[in-house]
Image (cartoon, helix red, strand yellow):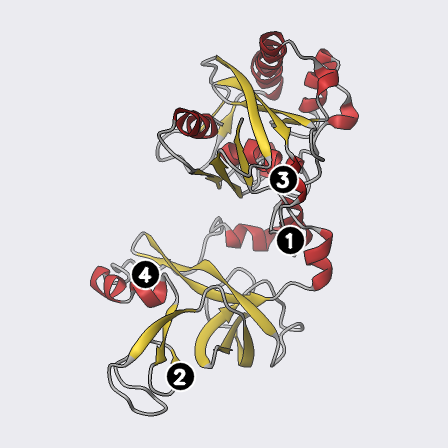
């Protein structure tokens, strides 16, 4: 929320026409702990501007409280927390409540003026205590997403904001409450532009596509929390020189189209595979296109928390590319199936993660229509 306020201030002052605010977090609770059960990974992005906005930022109120209740020291793998009752009674409940009351006093508003309350919470029960203390209408509380996502750390409040905006109508007011080393309340009012915002991949869209982990052991494997028979190799990993030289293909996912015959090919090379023309190409971006699976195999040797790894040859705009397939089971994989592309981690070597593009099934029309996910842009009044 501090980044959102900084963006609002920059746009209002005229030092920026637009600002992109991104929040993401991936925290680990110790295996078997309550934090492990309530945590989730997530990210949200907002484009802040002063024109064609779907919500106007109205006001904010913040307080500071340096209470160490949940923390992670530098080098710690897991997040730590004091006893739950202490966290709620001395930290979360009074601090967030004070921020919300301060907002009401500052703006001359009250709980009845807001259609939705999106409140940060450490778990699905504690937010009810804040609502009860402030006499908030609990039917107007935004779903905390526990059991489906969980508390996503610094991204949690922005995700709740995005989720709330997906269902609000023009002219409705929303109050966002964030907590951490104090608390902050931010007020928004939706505009008529919210009805014109096209379908997009918002919170509801992603939740509709989630896949449950089949077992706790597989979860531990995915988090690298299991002891393995053999340690991962400790070499230096991908050469920085190679990574720099191939950045257009590996990061931007660019192919090339022959200026002579129009054939698309990947990876980039000097001679056309079709007409043998030399050095006569124009770049083509593949990341925003769709492709189809030409052939595939199941790799049971590549290290993955949920074997097998599905490896495909995928045709994209005429070019054939070797890609892993994710978000699909072996039973769902078919030749000819349409796929789109997502930037994912392939592996980690030498202490550095290596990212590349992977294919995933194109979502069905039912998922696209049922979860439009309208929230992506907010703004200043």
Residue 248 at x, y percent in the picture: 32, 65
In the picture, measured across the screen, residue 167 lies left or right of residue 71, that is: right
- The quadrant the C terminus occupies is top right
Distance in Å between CA atoms under marks 1 and 3 = 29 Å
Please name which of the two marks, 3 or 4, marks the residue nearer to the observer: 3
Of pointers 2 and 1, the one earlier in the residue sequence:
1
Give the vertical position of 53 relative to 129 (above or below).
Answer: below
Q: Residue at x 45, y 58 (%)?
A: 344
Of pointers 3 and 2, the one earlier in the residue sequence:
3
Please give the residue where the numbered disc 4 appears in the rendered image.
233
Q: Nearer the viewer, residue 325 or 249?
A: 249
The reply to whether discs 2 and 4 touch (Cβ–Cβ < 8 Å) is no
Q: Residue at x 44, y 80 (%)?
A: 319
Distance in Å between CA atoms under marks 3 and 4 = 53 Å
Distance in Å between CA atoms under marks 2 and 4 = 43 Å
Please name which of the two marks, 1 or 3, marks the residue nearer to the observer: 3
Please give the residue where the numbered disc 2 appears in the rendered image.
262
Q: Residues within 10 Å of mark 2 (few under 14, many from 20)?
A: some
Residue placed farthest to the left in the image? 241
Q: Nearer the viewer, residue 380 or 254?
A: 380
Please give the residue where the numbered disc 3 appears in the rendered image.
193
Residue 244 at x, y percent in the picture: 24, 61
């Amino acid at each position: 929320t501090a980044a959102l306020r900084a963006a609002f201030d920059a746009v209002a002052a005229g030092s920026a026409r637009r600002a992109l605010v991104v929040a993401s977090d991936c925290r680990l609770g110790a295996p078997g702990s309550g934090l492990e059960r309530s945590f989730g990974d997530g990210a949200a992005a907002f484009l802040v501007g002063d024109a064609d906005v779907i919500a106007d930022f109205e006001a904010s109120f913040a307080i500071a409280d340096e209470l160490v209740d949940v923390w992670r020291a530098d080098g710690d793998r897991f997040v730590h927390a004091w006893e739950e009752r202490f966290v709620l009674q001395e930290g979360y409940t009074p601090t967030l409540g004070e921020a919300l009351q301060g907002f009401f006093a500052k703006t001359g508003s009250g709980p009845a003026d807001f259609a939705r309350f999106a409140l940060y919470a450490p778990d699905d029960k504690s937010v009810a205590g804040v609502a009860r203390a402030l006499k908030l209408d609990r039917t107007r509380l935004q779903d905390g997403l526990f059991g489906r996502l969980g508390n996503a750390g610094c991204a949690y409040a922005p995700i709740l904001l995005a989720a709330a905006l997906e269902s609000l109508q023009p002219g409705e007011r929303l109050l966002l409450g964030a907590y951490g080393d104090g608390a902050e309340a931010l007020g928004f009012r939706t505009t008529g532009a919210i009805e014109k915002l096209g379908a997009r991949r918002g919170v509801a869209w992603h939740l509709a596509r989630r896949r449950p982990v089949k077992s706790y052991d597989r979860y531990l494997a995915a988090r690298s929390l299991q002891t393995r028979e053999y340690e991962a190799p400790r070499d230096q990993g991908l050469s920085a020189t190679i990574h720099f030289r191939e950045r257009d293909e590996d990061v931007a996912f660019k192919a090339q189209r022959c200026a002579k015959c129009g054939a698309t090919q990947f990876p980039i090379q000097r001679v056309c595979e079709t007409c043998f023309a030399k050095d006569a190409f124009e770049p083509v971006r593949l990341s925003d296109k769709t492709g189809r699976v030409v052939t595939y195999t199941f790799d049971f040797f590549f290290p993955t928390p949920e074997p097998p790894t599905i490896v495909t040859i995928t045709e994209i705009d005429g070019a054939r590319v070797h890609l892993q397939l994710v978000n699909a089971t072996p039973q769902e994989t078919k030749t000819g199936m349409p796929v789109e592309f997502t930037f994912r981690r392939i592996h980690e070597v030498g202490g550095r993660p290596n990212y590349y593009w992977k294919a995933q099934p194109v979502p069905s029309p039912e998922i696209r229509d049922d979860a439009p996910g309208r929230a992506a842009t907010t703004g200043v009044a």
